[in-house]
């Protein structure tokens, strides 16, 4: 039977590195870009007798994440050991949380703008939140070290070992690959807004395990859960699910029962390969960590309350209300928090925030991507950008001329926008001086003028061009056309 006759149930486990100075249980530096195995100590290398000390800030960030997602925090949260032997885990156990995690319940809102561009699922949605996906819990643990595999050997970098890792576990409450994409995107935006993590999937700061099961419509009991581990992009998660749903439906059609198992998604090959079957919590022999006392959460919850950030849907509503931005522009800015901060700084220095947003989204972003730099590296300050839009508004330059001015400012970031325009021969048009040039062009091109008057308005551009050519400094073409229109009585 067709795939659409099956009910699809998807659950997600998202691992997210928390932005902290130090590791979870020792004072080694956390973060990227260091020489391998330089940020290590007896504790994160699992030396006998080395004892852990909790990173309070990582706990606060986890509780704050829970607060942003409407979770509750139990009065006491404790630590457990998840036992397994692997080269990336020198202690032979991972310190994690099993039955008393820091956050319980909660929901992830699926934002309308977070769905894939070609998805029809959010079409017609009213408001910013299409629906909310239930969470099971969020717990805090430590990341494993990083293994790099070469031909017949592997190297391990323990710098990552022991860095704080938050695991956000959803209920089996998602129903499609598009929703899964929107879930990851929405969650990423929330984590960035809260300053919890940069959540860059390419850098492995956010990774996900996806599980999916199918059952015939009408059947209450969920089908066998099949998990795909370590998926490292939103589009890969979507592709993996499309493939896996079709694969399971095909096997069920042919009477092949599904078995709970873990598969590996190979994004290059576009297929999933079985790794192991049947793996349950008891396989890991979880037990309470004897080295760490449980955390009493009341004072942390109280402290974090005052740190609640503006969430993406509130930001979206504010961009529209405060700056009168079109919905599409608000969607773009909410999707890129850094760009949005830049916009708000520029808007504060401008009388035309809507035009500022338009310029940032359509011109500045294109320039940034052409030059392969991020908004953080943009040489134009938000104030300079506001001034650039300002000289368009004042009629000193046209939109096209402003692009040339932007290039000048790019090379001379400290320059005044008006001065940069003047260096290209663009000055505020003196209507009186322009009058004379317009009169001259009209007098010398009577044939064209007659045809314009007879209705060939396209030729108005030709007349504008002639005035532009005959003027120095270069006037604003829009103004020239306006004077021509008035003089010709059009
Ligand atoms: Zn350490």
Image: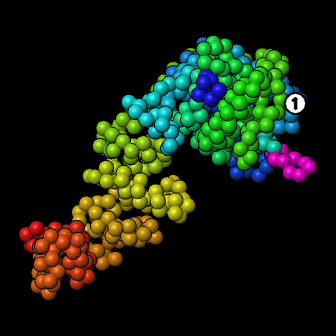
Residue 221 image offset from top left, x and y in percent: 66, 13
Ligand 1 neighbours mark 1 (CB distance < 8 Å) = no
298 with respect to 457 (left or right): right
User: Residue placed at 43% from the left, 50% from the top?
Assistant: 342
User: Residue placed at 68% from the left, 37% from the top?
Assistant: 243
Residue 195 image offset from top left, x and y in percent: 54, 37
Instruction: Please name whichever residue, 309 or 475, is drawn nearer the observer in this view of the structure.
Output: 475
Please say whether residue 154 is one of the residues in the magenta stretch: yes
Q: How many marks?
A: 1
- The region drawn magenta spans 148-157
Q: Residues within 10 Å of mark 1 (few under 14, many from 20)?
A: few
Which quadrant, please, contains the N terminus?
Answer: top right
Placement of 400 over or under 245, stated as above or below: below
Magenta span dominant secondary structure: strand
- Mark yes or no: residue 45 visible: no
- Mark yes or no: residue 117 visible: yes
């Amino acid at each position: 039977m067709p795939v659409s006759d099956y009910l699809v149930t998807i659950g997600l486990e998202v691992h997210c590195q928390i932005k902290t100075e130090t590791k979870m249980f020792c004072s080694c530096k956390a973060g990227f870009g260091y020489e391998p195995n330089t940020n290590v100590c007896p504790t994160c290398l699992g030396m006998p007798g080395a004892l852990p000390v909790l990173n309070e800030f990582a706990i606060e960030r986890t509780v704050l994440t829970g607060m942003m997602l409407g979770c509750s925090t139990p009065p006491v949260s404790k630590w457990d050991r998840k036992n397994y032997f692997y080269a990336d885990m020198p202690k032979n156990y991972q310190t994690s949380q099993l039955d008393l995690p820091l956050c319980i319940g909660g929901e992830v809102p699926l934002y309308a703008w977070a769905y894939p561009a070609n998805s029809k699922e959010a079409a017609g949605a009213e408001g910013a939140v299409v629906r909310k996906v239930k969470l099971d819990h969020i717990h805090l643990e430590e990341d494993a070290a990083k293994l790099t595999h070469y031909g017949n050997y592997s190297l391990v970098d323990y710098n990552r070992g022991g860095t704080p890792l938050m695991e956000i576990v959803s209920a089996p409450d998602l129903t499609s690959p598009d929703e899964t994409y929107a879930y990851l995107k929405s969650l990423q935006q929330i984590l960035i807004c809260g300053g919890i993590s940069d959540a860059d999937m390419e850098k492995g700061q956010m990774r996900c395990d996806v599980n999916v099961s199918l059952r015939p419509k009408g059947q209450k009991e969920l089908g066998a859960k099949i998990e795909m581990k370590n998926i490292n992009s939103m589009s890969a998660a979507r592709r993996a699910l499309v493939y896996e749903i079709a694969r399971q439906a095909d096997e069920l059609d042919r009477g092949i029962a599904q078995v709970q198992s873990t598969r590996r998604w190979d994004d290059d090959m576009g297929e999933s390969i079985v790794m192991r079957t049947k793996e349950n919590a008891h396989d890991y022999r979880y037990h309470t960590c004897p080295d760490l006392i449980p955390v009493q959460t009341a004072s942390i919850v109280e402290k974090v309350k005052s740190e609640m950030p503006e969430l993406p849907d509130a930001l979206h509503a504010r961009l529209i209300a405060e700056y009168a931005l079109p919905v599409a522009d608000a969607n773009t800015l909410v999707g890129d928090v850094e760009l949005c901060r830049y916009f708000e700084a520029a808007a504060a220095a401008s009388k035309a925030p809507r035009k500022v947003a338009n310029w940032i989204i359509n011109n500045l972003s294109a320039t940034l991507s052409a030059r392969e730099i991020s908004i953080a590296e943009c040489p134009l300050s938000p104030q300079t950008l506001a001034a650039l839009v300002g000289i368009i508004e004042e009629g000193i330059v046209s939109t096209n001329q402003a692009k040339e001015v932007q290039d000048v400012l790019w090379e001379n970031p400290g320059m005044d926008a008006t001065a940069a325009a003047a260096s290209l021969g663009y000055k505020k048009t003196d209507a009186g001086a322009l009058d004379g040039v317009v009169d001259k062009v009209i007098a010398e091109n009577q044939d064209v003028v007659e045809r314009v008057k007879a209705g060939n308005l396209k030729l108005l551009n030709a007349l504008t061009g002639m005035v532009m050519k005959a003027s120095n400094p270069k006037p604003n073409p829009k103004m020239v056309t306006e004077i021509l229109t008035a003089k010709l009585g059009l």
